[in-house]
Amino acid sequence: MTSIRVDTLEPLPGREEPPRRHVPPGRWLRENLFSTWYNSVLTVLFAALLGLLLYRVGRFVFVDGRWEIIERNLRLLLVFRFPDDALWRLWTAMYVLAGTFGLAAGAAATVRRAEVAAGRARPIGGRFLPLRRVAPVVVLAAVLLWLAGSVGATLLVAGAAAVAVLGRLAGTLLPRRYAKWTAVLALVGLAAAFGIVIGLGGVSPRTWGGLLLTIYLAIGGIAISFPLGVLLALGRRSSLPAVRVVCVTYIEIIRGVPLITVLFVGYLIIGFTLPPGTPTPSVVTRAMIGIILFTAAYVAEIVRGGLQSVPRGQYEAAQALGLSPVKTTWLIVLPQALRAVIPAMVGQFISLFKDTSLVFIIGLTELLGVADLITKQREFTAQGLIFETLLFVSLLYWVGSYSMSRESQRLERRLGVGER
Amino acid sequence: MLRVVFQLVFLVLVVGVVLYLYSNVLRNLDRLGIGTSFGFLDESAGFSIANSDFDPSANLFAAILVGVQNTAIVSFAGIALATVIGVIVGVARLSTNWLVRRTAAGYVETLRNVPVLIIILFWYLAVILQLPPIQRAVDWGWLVLSNRGLVVVWLERTGDLAVFLAVLGAGAVLAAAVSVWRTRRFDATGQPHRRLLWAAGVLVAAVVLGFFAGGRPFGLSLPERGELGTEHGFLLSPEYGAILIGLTLYTSSHIAEIVRGSILAVPRGQTEAANALGLSPFARLRYVVLPQATRIMIPPLANQYLNLVKNSSLGVAIAYPEVTRVIRIAIGQQAPAPQSVLVLMLVYLCFSLGISLVTNLVNRRLALRER
Amino acid sequence: MRLLHLKVTLPLSILGLLLAGCIGGSEGNEGQGGQAGGQQGNTLQRVQDRGTLNCGINDAVPGFGVVTPQGEYEGFDIDYCRAVAAAVLGDPNAVEFKPVTTEQRFTALQSGEIDVLIRNTTWTAERDGAEGATFLHTTFYDGQGMMVPADSDYRRLEDMDGTTICVLSGTTTELNLATAFRARNLEHEPLSFEDNETLQQAFQQGRCDGWTSDKSQLAGVRSSWPDNQGGPDALRILDEEFSKEPLGPVVRDGDSPWAQAIDWTVIATIQAEEFGITSENVEQMKGDQNEEIRRLLGEENFDSGLGLPDDFAVQVIQAVGNYGEIYDRNVGADSPLGLERGLNDLYTNGGLHYAPPYR
């Protein structure tokens, strides 16, 4: 199910960029679309295919589609049976996220500008870059709000967007010293958001569903499996044969089986591994454990890749300085390795985000599960509405994955040239 | 000394934890009266499997083997197709034609950002099922296309194959010899070797010779359309088509990114040198860039192949009888769930280890010998 | 930067710890997950101590268990969960619905995660014997049937030699199908789907010639068949029924008090229909002249020793109504499924529902 995405292979931009040229449209067409006869054929062919595809999709979306099922069930799709009187927690969490992420983005931009000014990094991007970055999310939000048709929700979302923008502006004012900790800020915000929803008499994840559950499983899965994965990777490269064998066995077995089966085994067996009499964890927790066990093996492989990318000279230099093996790993190797693996980790997270759809197999209703479940309702049963629900859900998945993969590519380019 | 002690402690800990959990499992299962035997594999399956000669009275193990076979078929076809399409799209992403480049980018970004299950469902529901029903099938005599599948003309055995196979075997040996000869000649004289052309020619001659020498041991099997389906010919079932297309598209979008990255990772000097030698764009790609890129892309490709095999388990959604589907049917009627799932894991583990083995061998062969 | 790894590892670890804490915390609050041991006996006592009933259900079967757009569960099986909660706890809303899949259901029951399984599960000898489960009073008599397009020539199963059949996978449907065709010496090609929606598309487009499933499900699909596909008249359900599917609640083996409590909850709904007690008139009926009615409604000084409150039947009927009301509301005349009563009528009307006397 899960794959290691290769956003990492994006090359560094070449040293000398040609000056930007202003080409008249006619010449641009000739150069880019009709340079040779086979290029012209390709152009015509692709234009026809694209046109047909757009027409069919457009017709379905705007003419034939019966979107009532989505309108009526929007709430189920997003948060499933989340209780009404706790909805404020979700909104608060959203504001916290908007604020901290905005602040983090602003601070990151400051750091970056300083680097560019110091000549240690190169500017990337083009015209309307910020707009292009947020466009998919904005479109998605607009579609959701239009479907919801609720003034309150629109105002609240607009407020959250405003908070994010304010945070972004405030972030640029942060002194550079603190700006370095922006990553921490974003993650603390994330944890705080979860805390607000769950803690202090909040709603326990075992009753979650829809998009909320999808996000919870993906974020929880990647965050908790990270330390495990690092340990496994270090174990795999250990000089102690016993440690190495155990780690390799674990990693290879897990990577050899589909997530479906790991989830299933997790569901059936975790309850039985506890001493008789102890309460069985809830299904959501068991799914989370299955996902963590599974993802840890993939994270381990990613981190191993990072460890291998650290030049031998670094180890040798550390030894020459008389550092102990533990100190060598902690102070010299890991910092360099982990920086190299961030983009691949984002890729892994995206895979996880999509693969959580498999928890339907153990009876949980995440996004895709809800899409199926609502077609069984009294009003909508046997109406053939599966196309509408699938298309809507794909849009959610697509915007999430696409935005994250774009950000990961940016991050990677930055890390490639960044502070060194 | 310290190392040995540490390892011992570590091993004792790991083994201890595993044993503790295992003993808990046994105790719990025992108390709840849940069986742990694998005897169910010997019981009669009781259900039929689509597009196979499987007899419902055969045992469950045989049913699972049919499922394994179906998984293998779709996986290998998928791997081959996804590689070809992935390479094409990956190269297209670097095309000089703006529209081609953007379309390839759109292809990649659309397909790899939605769950593969949705892609498979889309193809099955929105494309393949929309083909004409069997009563109004496209029927060209040698090809019948309907939403009950694509049936094409195929070969059918009419006589003894022994002579034919003997001639074919001899032809294969001869073809190999010819290929070696052409290679040596090329090494000696530098004239174009065209060894593939030569070897293929010899093989074709052997097939023709064998066909007549063996008394025409096989003939054409033309599809015959009936009310309910098509007899004879070679059938590609709609479910197979949908899962194959879905897996191929999804995996090829990932492979395209690997290919693109690998091509870009080939030093620019190589391309420039090829240009300086006056190679055509195609020759440059074929003889200079791709061979070097291949070396870089093998390990990530192996991962994608593994994923494709594992993703084939999503055939459950569209009635393709691969191994997960078969085991789920079995669980639905009598097989105990925990043991059945362990069998399923074992099957996928075997597939994965097999693919790892092959790709590791290829990787070792292709790896740069450092001098 | 020396501190860079801290910037990465520290926050991720914090997040990990926090989330782990969240999980742990939520489990702590919960305190009502099942017991890994699945203690023998006294489920009734434990349910009453806990104050909620854990009911294993299916959340995607039209008429039997679905989630409404408001996020409420509704359906025939759901109503029986509520009835049990009303009987043993006096509150039809004290139910924790736990959707379980086909593979999970018996494990969930054995491990104590659910107290009762009310999820269209067919009563068979092997399940009753080998799965450590006990099947209770049947709430719904179903049978596997075959649906074909009305304009086809198929009138009986015998006409269907060599056809392709779409099967809704999950329980014993594939097995029954194979058995039915083999018994008649017919060939068939099964296409087994995980989900009704996908199957329906395949059937609609003529990928298969017949659709087999429980007759209640087929009738439900038929009555909701879209008008642009010709409406219900475009489909025909063959008369043959090639399996018996008695569906009812399931509990763990070896817990008679709990089994009896659920059995008599079901029986009370059937008895109420026989007596003509409905959710509307239950208050008046308490003063009825008929002694048996008064006994059922807890107005006589009668202790059955079942461990249920005296007025459990009143609670049940007020909450969900009698059997006929439950049936009509979810799957019968008042629902999109529009099923006939058929086998599910009272024995007095030629059906199979016959309540043992409450005395």
Image (cartoon, coloured by chain):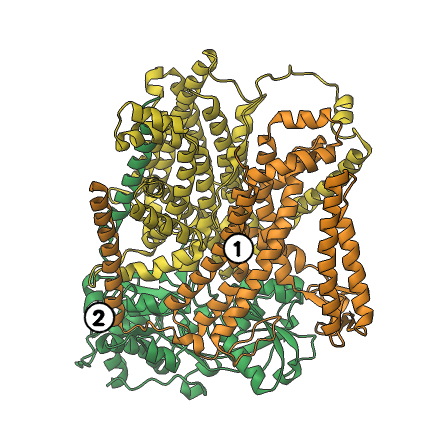
* Pointer 2 residue: C44
* Pointer 1 residue: B309
- In the rendered image of the structure, the colour used to display chain B is orange
In the image, what residue type sits under mark 1? Val
- In the rendered image of the structure, the colour used to display chain C is green
- Locate residue A119, reporting x and y percent: 48, 12
Q: Residue at x 59, y 61 (%)?
A: B73
User: Furthest residue to the top?
Assistant: A118
Q: Is residue A74 left or right of residue B21?
A: right
- Decide which of B358, C127 is in the foreground and name it: B358
Q: Is residue A278 above or below residue A306?
A: below
The number of numbered badges drawn on the structure is 2
Q: Which chain is yellow?
A: A
Mark 2 vs 1: CB contact within 8 A:
no
Q: Residue at x 70, y 28 (%)?
A: B274
Q: Is residue A77 left or right of residue B100?
A: left
Q: Is residue B43 above or below residue B273?
A: below
Whether residue A414 is visible, yes or no, is yes
The C terminus of chain A: image quadrant: top left
Q: Is residue A366 left or right of residue B93?
A: left
Task: Using the image, name the chain to which the residue with label 2 belongs.
Answer: C
- Locate residue B325, reporting x and y percent: 51, 65
User: Furthest residue to the front?
Assistant: B188
- Locate residue C313, reporting x and y percent: 27, 74
In the image, what residue type sits under mark 2? Leu
